[in-house]
Image (spheres, grey):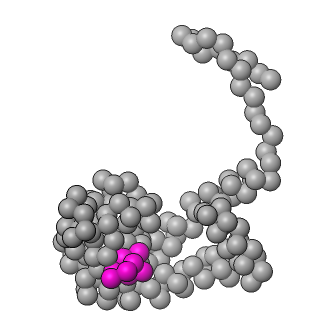
Amino acid sequence: MQTHVIPGYSRFSVTRPAETEGTVAWGLLLRTHAALVPELGRLVEDATGLPLTWYDVLLELNRAPERRLRMTELGERVVLSRSQVSRLVDDMIEGDLVGKQPDPTDGRATLAFLTPKGRGALRRAAPFYLEGIERLFSSRLTGREIKDMTSALTRVLE
């Protein structure tokens, strides 16, 4: 165990934990995500002009019941903070890809919804998104590896 002294602080001990298979897997998951998402984003945006974050919003709204979600739910699904998703949706409203309206069941909440133009943009971008996932990710794994990864990540999310 190593002891480090930082000026202005009392002594504290820092140990470096041994890497486990779990921490190695976690690190690889983060590195893979960091490497592939920007590349996928470039593929989609170069082909369609649609930023990947916009595609993600359109995809999640399309999957939602009645193609609408509360802003908080949308933020959770696309992994953005409340202020980030609000700015993103406001930018997308300018392009008539999504809209916002008060939630009729909760006056404090706002719903984001998919517009027909947004649905068309999603349809045009989907082939490039799916091809990118296939080329950058799926083609590098066996069917068994994909099934195992899907099962494992599903368990973790549950």
Judge from the rendering whether residue 121 lies leftward or rightward of residue 33; answer left or right. Answer: left
Residue 43 in the magenta stretch? The answer is no
Q: Residue at x 54, y 10 (%)?
A: 8
Q: Quick check: 65 left or right of 42?
A: left
Residue 3: x %, y % from top left: 73, 18
Q: How far from the left and from the top, in percent, is residue 74?
A: 37, 66
Specify the quadrant that holds the N terminus.
top right
Please state the horizontal and vertical placement of residue 139, each as a whole percent of the image: 68, 82
Left/right of residue 149 with respect to residue 9 in the rendered view: right
The residue under the point 73% across, 57% down is 25
Above or below: residue 134 compared with residue 4: below
Q: Which residue is the extreme one toward the front? A: 105
Q: Is residue 138 above or below residue 13?
A: below
Whether residue 45 appears in this view of the structure is no
32 or 83, which lies in front? 83
User: Can you see residue 1?
Assistant: yes
Task: Write the residue at 28% across / 76% down.
Answer: 113
Quadrant assignment, res 4: top right
Which residue is located at x 39 percent, y 78 percent?
64
Magenta residues, dominant SS class: helix
Q: Which residues are magenta?
A: 60-67
Does 8 appear above or below 16? above
